[in-house]
Image (spheres, rainbow, N blue to C red):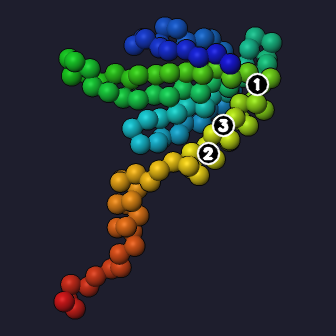
Amino acid sequence: MYFEDFDINDSQERNGDDVFSKPVRAGKRTYFFDVKATKNNDYYLTITESKRRLDRDGRFVYDKHKIFLYKEDFEKFSQGLEEIIKYIRENAPQTQEKTTKDSTSSFSDVNFEEL
């Protein structure tokens, strides 16, 4: 597995032939899951987190962080990810945001003409 940060021009990105891509929008971030092929036609996965932010001069820039995941690491990576997600779901304290969202979803519709 290999981690890489990007500068504004993405000049450090490794080359690889694009095979398949799946963007996932999640709030203020977008995750890109990209299958790439080496020169020997061996596949690997890149996972990129991209977050848009406003620069000092008022322009939008994207902060990007990338993980290169090779097929020999898939099993251990997916097991570790599954385990840590399960731990967080079972042990994370309830946040005020989640509590507020849950409590508002339990209200019934109100017909103001009946009041």
Q: Quadrant of residue 69?
A: top right
Q: Position of residue 24 (x, y in %)?
A: 53, 40
Circles 3 and 2, Cβ within 8 Å, touching? The answer is no
In the drawing, what numbered circle is on residue 81? 3
Please name the residue that numbered disc 1 is placed on: 73
* Residue with the most extreme bottom position: 114
Above or below, 26 relative to 74: below
- Image check: 67 left or right of 43? left
In the drawing, what numbered circle is on residue 112? none
At label 1, counting other C-alpha atoms closer than 10 Å, the crowd grade (few under 14, some 14-19, many 20 or more) is: few
At label 3, counting other C-alpha atoms closer than 10 Å, the crowd grade (few under 14, some 14-19, many 20 or more) is: few
Report the quarter where the C terminus lies: bottom left
Please name the residue that numbered disc 2 is placed on: 87
Q: Position of residue 11 (x, y in %)?
A: 49, 8
Label located before the other in sequence (3 or 2): 3
- Image check: 62 left or right of 32? left
At label 2, counting other C-alpha atoms closer than 10 Å, the crowd grade (few under 14, some 14-19, many 20 or more) is: few
Q: Residue at x 62, y 28 (%)?
A: 34
Three-letter amino acid code of the residue under disc 3: Leu
Label located before the other in sequence (1 or 3): 1
